[in-house]
Image (cartoon, helix red, strand yellow):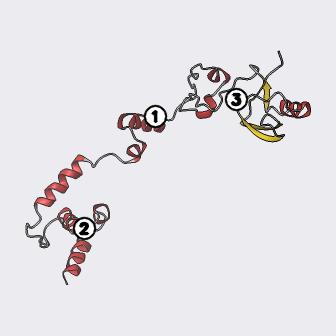
Amino acid sequence: MAKRYQVVAECAHVTTSTTGVRSQVLLYKGAFLPDDVEPERLKFLLDGGFVAEEGDTSVAPNAAVEQDPRSGADSVTSDVLRGEKPAEDERPQSDVSEQVADVVTEEGAIDKAANPPGEDPEVATRRAAAREKLPTDGSMPKTQNGHDVWVEYHVAQGGNYDDLVKQDKDELIKLAKSRQS
C-alpha cells in the first residue's frame, strides 16, 4: 500500500490532474494529497511542514477543537487534537477576571458584566426623599430647600443626575432662574 500524506498546515497548494486537467489546487488542513503529486513538490511540502504521513501528526480537519477559555489557543495540544479534554490551566488568575467570569456566568452576557453595579441604596433613599419635597405643580422649589432637592428638580426637567450632583446649590438655583426667563 502506498504512503498517504495529509495536510497538517492550514493549507497547501499542489498540482494534480485528478480533475482531468493538470491544475493547481488548494488543499486545506486534514485533506489527503492526490497520488499524482510530483515527488519534488511532495519533498518541498514535507520539508516545510505543510504535510506529513498519515497518522504522524495529529490534525483536526476544519473542526472546532475544545479549548480552555482561560488560555485560548494555548490549550490546544496534540492530546486535545486526539479528542482528550484540555489540561487544567495552572497559571494564576487575576481577581478581576474571576469576577467578570462569575458575572458572565450568572448574568449570561458580557455586556451586563461591563455595567457598574446598581445605585447605592443610601443614594436612592436620599433621592426619593428629595423628590418628595418637590412642588407637585412642577414649579421651582423654594431657595431654602437643600442641594438634593435642587438636583432632583433639574433631573425632573431632563438633566443628568451625575452632572447635576457635582454642581453647588447656588449654581443650580441660577440655572433654574435662567431657564424661567
Q: Nearer the viewer, mark 1 or mark 2?
A: 2
Q: Quadrant of residue 138?
A: bottom left
Q: Amino acid at mark 3?
A: Gly
Q: Which label sits on residue 108?
A: none
Q: Identify the mark nearer the N-term, 1 or 2.
A: 1
Label number found at residue 158: 2
At mark 3, the secondary structure is: loop
Tell me: residue 155, above or below residue 81.
below
Residue at far left of view: 136
Observer-side mark, 1 or 3, equals: 3
Tag 1 secondary structure: helix
* Picture coordinates of residue 66, whole percent (x, y): 56, 27
Residue that carries the numbered disc 3 in the rendered image: 30
* Pointers 1 and 2 in contact (C-beta within 8 Å): no
Q: Secondary structure at mark 2?
A: loop
Between 69 and 34, the one lying in front of the other is 34
- Please report the residue visible at 33 percent of the width from the left and 45 percent of the height from the top: 117
Q: Quadrant of the C terminus?
A: bottom left
Observer-nearest of 95 and 31:
31
In the image: residue 22, left or right of residue 82: right
Q: Quadrant of the N terminus?
A: top right
Q: Give how far across and how far down residue 54 sits, in percent.
A: 76, 21
Q: Residue at x 90, y 30 (%)?
A: 39
Mark 2, other Cα within 10 Å: few <14 / some 14–19 / many ≥20: few
Which image quadrant for residue 137?
bottom left
Quick one: label 3, few (<14), some, or many (20+) residues within 10 Å?
many
Q: Amino acid at mark 2?
A: Gly
Q: Which mark is residue 98?
A: 1
Residue 110 against residue 79 in the figure, above or below: below
Residue 131 is situated, as x and y percent measured from the top left of the image, at 14, 60
